[in-house]
Image: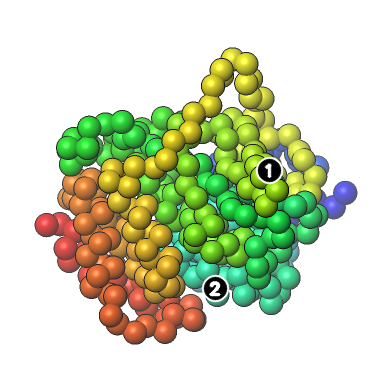
Amino acid sequence: MTPRCLCILGATGSIGESTLDVVRRHPERFQVYALSAHSRMERLAELAAQTGAKLVAVPDDAARLRFIAAWPASGIPLPEILLGPEALEACASADQVDTVMAAIVGAAGLPSALAAARAGKRVLLANKEALVAAGGLFMQAVRDTGAELLPIDSEHNAIFQCLPQTDKAFAPHMPAPGVRRLLLTASGGPFRTLPIEQLAQVTPDQACAHPNWEMGRKISVDSATMLNKGLEVIEAHWLFAMPPDRIQVVIHPQSMVHSMVEYDDGSILAQLGQPDMRTPIAYGLGFPERIDSGVGLLDLATLGRLDFEPPDLQRFPCLALSFQALRSGQDACIVLNAANEVAVAGFLAQRLPFTGITRCIEESLSHFQSRAHPVDALDAILDLDAQVRRYVAGRAGR
Ligand code: NAD
Ligand code: MG
């Protein structure tokens, strides 16, 4: 078989490393052509040398020098090194590449994920912020080029697996026939049972100590506020052409049921498995075949029980704000996402209390509400995103 030729954007992150772990198990199926990282150049150099990547994208000249200094002097030729945000788009659309893992965190991953879709690649989409900020534009690009879009976020991957089966991924215009609702499961994060009055004092390390998943710090904080689930509702809306009132969030503390699809005849189909991102990653890499992911099986008898409960919107106001933004339109989703990114960075740097994240999002949604922003093109989206970042940065220290 001809191996798939991969570009992994965000190779040094949690999803990037898990992707490389699956790839290493199948040397005959996959080869790595391009890798990117924004920091940790030593790790990027190690990964590029191990995989034989021909191209790497790094942020600037200082990073390039660190990459070269870290290169193992073992006779392996250095890869070509590209600099800056445009380098990410060049890697994603390189002719040699047929499959792109979009695993950069935040809206910073949007232009390169979009470039992959515009170049008609198989796009393994972990970067949910790309769909939150630019769902309409992104899905249209997938339709226009016939790119193959496979969701990697575990909930959306589960839903994709539970929808009527197809061996070609596509971007639907309407909900799949017979489907009544999508049921997105959520663990409830580390603060599901903490007394609400203690939320203002929680530390970044407490917020990042997720009970079931090991992830990057930004998405870990998003899980603690449950804004992550809100972003995922918006993501599901775009991926599956599902109206907001047909997407329901269910708390499921064990994180073994990754999400469900409810059909008109009363059937509910669920996908279960260990909470390990290598399962959805392997699904996307191998699609439509199933390949080994390195993840152990789920022993239901040992597990004993699976619990479900409705989300508490008082504790998790970010979930309600996300539904509100989705109903309001694309510009509100851009505001929600950008305000959250700046606020989470402020919380992680200990400039803002945990409860300040919700406050920043609320203030931004109301501040930008009445302005008319045409957000149908990438430039307009990035422009509004930058305006919101400036607005929140001026307030996040209060
Ligand atoms: P992470 O912080 O562990 O890794 C992020 C990667 O992106 C790193 O390689 C980093 O160098 C790079 N990066 C950061 N800022 C960048 C910038 N401005 N420009 C270019 N590259 C940049 O994040 P993660 O947990 O791997 O998450 C990546 C994406 O996948 C996020 O969108 C997240 O929501 C999504 N996701 C992650 C998980 C998970 O289990 N970690 C699950 C579902 C979805
Ligand atoms: Mg998820």
Mark linked to residue 396: none
- Residue picked out by circle 1: 267
Whether the residues at callouts 1 and 2 have beta carbons within 8 Å, the answer is: no
In the picture shown, does residue 360 fall above or below 201? Answer: below
**Residue occupying the point 42% across, 76% down:** 381
Q: Tell me the amino acid under the disc marked 2.
A: Gly
**Residue occupying the point 25% across, 53% down:** 357
Q: Find residue 125 and report its horizontal and vertical position in percent.
A: 59, 56
- Residue picked out by circle 2: 136
Please state which of the two labelled residues, at mark 1 or mark 2, is closer to the viewer.
Answer: 1
Callout 1 environment at 10 Å: few (<14), some (14 to 19), or many (20+)?
few
Q: Nearer the viewer, residue 242 or 380?
A: 242
**Residue occupying the point 48% across, 33% down:** 308
* Quarter holding residue 178: bottom right
Quadrant of image for the C terminus: bottom left
Q: Tell me the amino acid under the disc marked 1.
A: Ser
Secondary structure at badge 2 equals: helix
